[in-house]
Image (spheres, rainbow, N blue to C red):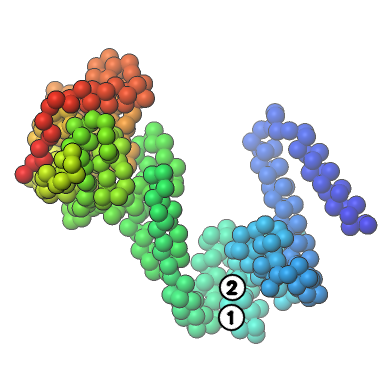
């Protein structure tokens, strides 16, 4: 009864703090409030870990039909298996890691740091656990959980040379990489990478991870996605080597209504996406007539040749979008006058645009990149008086662009460059 009353008092106290609101609080007051709340959460985690240890000792999880303590946590507390496993690891180590538990109780460590200590001690022989605990705690008071993981791994390797080998064997057994089906324009990726592959992936993505200027609206996760696209799509010297296959009916190439173009013969492409990917990707294009028969098949259509790309680098060394410093060698070659509207694949009609941000903005959002008459380019937003799409919102620009393309029904299909 007393425990229930005490918990009810804690709940009422937190509700009272919430009712007071945050209006009028300055930065220092907000920071202090955040630290206090995090400290309360850590105290609650410590108490919950002691409760969890008692549940395991009495075998109470079996009464609920769970096969082990982690499964019981997943069912009872609606946690992910990873989060439940962390708490079970801490609960089982409280009795042996007394120094760590004491630091958590006094607010000198947070629960994430304690989790790192518990995981590290779990990996070594029981007699070596106190030594590992001391080595990790020596760094814990001055580093965050992310940095502490690296120090902990080094400590474990120093105390038990076989620990890394065991981890490597487990990681290799668990290694996996899954790409789900394309649903509504996206596919979910999941899996477990070995440390070596994860490090290699980070190394390859890092050069493409920087924001493209101060106005780059992408989140860090979106930049990682776009960096992966750039990394996979580039070869020697930054030249585009993406070998994409687009199967398209003649009507799609003319911008008419009808069956869409299919990327890799499977994934439907919108007219905007077709224009964007056809602007500077090494495409293998297959055209079908109205009866579905192959009318033409060719390679590397609509692209700038290596010689033209070198000329582009000499003329414009960075992305042509104002304010972007992405090197032109890492950019797409954009047709200043769109290819589907009659633009030519010439050096004069070529502008480098970074593929992650500014190339899509031109094709999808109504921006324009035009020659400035002095050998460079100027960037015009949708409402600029000199923008060919003057005073049009991005949505209206796309609507009118599609309408203009459809008016060309009587024109012959665009023949890909030989």
Q: Work out which residue is located at the far front of the displayed protein and give it.
A: 291
Q: Residue at x 27, y 20 (%)?
A: 389
Work out which quarter of the rendered image holds the C terminus and state it.
Answer: top left
Tell me, for residue 27, which label it has, or none. Answer: none
x and y percentages locating residue 138 in the rendered image:
61, 68
Disc 1 on helix, strand or loop? loop
The correct choice, above or below, for 254 with respect to 136 in the image is above
Is residue 355 or residue 154 the one in the foreground?
A: 355
* Dot 1 and dot 2 residues touching (CB under 8 Å): yes
- Residue at 73%, 70% (x, y): give it: 65
Where residue 132 sits: x, y (%)?
Answer: 60, 76
Residue 400, picture quadrant: top left
Mark carried by residue 124: 1
How many residues crowd around disc 1 within 10 Å: few (fewer than 14), some, or many (20 or more)?
A: many
* Quarter assignment of residue 350: top left
Left or right of 28 in this view: 364? left
Observer-nearest of 388 and 403? 403
Q: Which residue is under mark 2? A: 120
The quadrant where residue 15 appears? top right
Residue 414 appears anywhere in the view: yes
């Amino acid at each position: 009864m007393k425990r229930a009353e005490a918990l009810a008092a804690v709940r009422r106290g937190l509700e009272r703090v919430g009712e007071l609101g945050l209006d009028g609080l300055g930065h220092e007051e907000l920071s202090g409030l955040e630290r206090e709340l995090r400290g309360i959460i850590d105290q609650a985690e410590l108490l919950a870990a002691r409760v969890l240890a008692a549940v395991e000792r009495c075998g109470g999880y079996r009464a609920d039909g769970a096969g082990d303590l982690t499964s019981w946590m997943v069912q009872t507390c609606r946690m992910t298996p990873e989060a439940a496993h962390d708490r079970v690891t801490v609960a089982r180590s409280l009795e042996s890691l007394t120094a760590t538990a004491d630091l958590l109780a006094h607010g000198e460590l947070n629960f994430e740091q304690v989790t790192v200590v518990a995981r590290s001690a779990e990996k070594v022989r029981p007699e070596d656990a106190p030594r590992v605990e001391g080595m990790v705690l020596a760094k814990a008071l001055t580093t965050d959980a992310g940095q502490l993981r690296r120090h902990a791994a080094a400590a474990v390797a120093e105390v038990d040379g076989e620990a890394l080998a065991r981890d490597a064997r487990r990681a290799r057994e668990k290694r996996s990489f899954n790409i789900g089906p394309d649903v509504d324009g996206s596919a979910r990726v999941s899996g477990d990478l070995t440390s070596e592959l994860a490090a290699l992936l980070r190394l390859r993505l890092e050069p493409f991870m920087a924001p493209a200027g101060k106005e780059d609206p992408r989140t860090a996760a979106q930049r990682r996605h776009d960096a992966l696209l750039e990394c996979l799509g580039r070869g020697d010297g930054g030249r585009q080597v993406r070998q994409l296959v687009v199967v398209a009916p003649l009507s799609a190439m003319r911008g008419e209504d009808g069956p869409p173009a299919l990327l890799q013969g499977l994934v439907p492409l919108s007219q905007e996406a077709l224009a964007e990917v056809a602007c500077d990707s090494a495409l293998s294009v297959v055209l079908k007539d109205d009866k579905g028969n192959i009318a033409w098949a060719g390679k590397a259509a609509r692209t700038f040749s290596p010689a033209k790309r070198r000329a582009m680098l000499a003329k414009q060394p960075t992305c042509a979008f104002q304010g972007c410093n992405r090197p032109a060698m890492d950019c797409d070659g954009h047709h200043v006058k769109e290819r589907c509207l009659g633009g030519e694949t010439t050096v004069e009609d070529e502008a480098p645009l970074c593929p992650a941000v500014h190339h899509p903005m031109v094709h999808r959002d109504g921006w324009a990149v035009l020659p400035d008459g002095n050998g460079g380019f100027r960037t015009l937003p949708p409402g600029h008086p000199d923008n060919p799409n003057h005073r049009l919102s991005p949505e209206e620009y796309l609507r009118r662009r599609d309408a203009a393309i459809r008016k060309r029904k009587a024109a012959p299909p665009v023949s890909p460059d030989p």
